[in-house]
Amino acid sequence: MGITPEILKKRTFDFALNALKTIDVLKKTTANEVMGRQLIRSSTSVGANYRAACKAKSTADFINKLKIVEEESDESVYWLELVKSHNKINDSNYETLLKESKELERIFSASAITAKNNKVKQQTQS
């Protein structure tokens, strides 16, 4: 059994929720506030844009929205790595969150490629 849209909706929701919790426990500094806002924006955008992709009006719209999800996942990886380095974090929960961010990025990248290849196949068969 593969990864279903419902599983991905739950994973992206949980990812955003865990990112929010991670930001809440950081020391209150100007740098952490800026990085925290950026991480909150990108991590919550992953799930929101994936849900939008699930309601896409066309294959092209679906692919476009998946690429946005992929970009936001990648941006989340960046902010998580920056927060980790800046705060010298060595925590297994944090590592799990970072791993999930990277995995979501790979999933959405592969999904966009598959959707694009399927679209090309359909066009050549028509």
Image (tube, grey):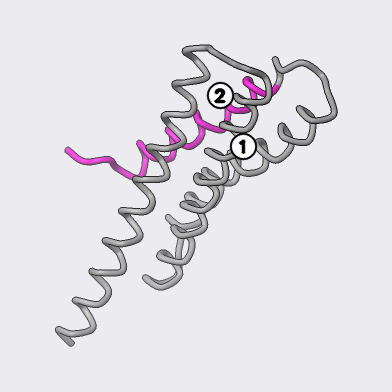
Point out residue 19 in the picture as x, y percentages from the top left corner: 59, 28
Q: Amino acid at mark 2?
A: Asn
Q: Note whether 53 is above or below 90 in the view shown.
A: below
In the picture, which quadrant includes the C terminus? bottom left
Q: Where is residue 116 drawn, in percent x and y?
A: 31, 69
Task: Name the residue at the right extreme.
Answer: 30
Quick one: 55 or 86, which is closer to the camera? 86
Question: In the rendered structure, which segment of residues is drawn in magenta?
Answer: 1-23
**The quadrant where residue 32 appears:** top right
Q: Is residue 27 left or right of residue 16?
A: right
Magenta part mainly helix, strand or loop?
helix
Tag 1 residue:
79
First-in-chain label (1 vs 2): 2
Q: Secondary structure at mark 2?
A: helix
The residue lying at 36 percent from left, 45 percent from top is 106
Rendering coords of residue 30 (x, y %): 85, 29
Residue at 32% x, 55% y: name it: 111
Where residue 27 appears, x then y in whole percent? 77, 16
Q: Up-down: is 115 above or below 71?
A: below
User: Is 69 a magenta residue?
Assistant: no
Element carrying mark 1: helix
Magenta span contains residue 15: yes
Query: Which quadrant holds residue 96?
Result: top left
Q: Residue at x 52, y 12 (%)?
A: 91
Q: Amino acid at mark 1?
A: Trp
In the picture of the structure, the residue carrying the numbered disc 2 is 18
* Relative to 71, residue 20 above or below: above
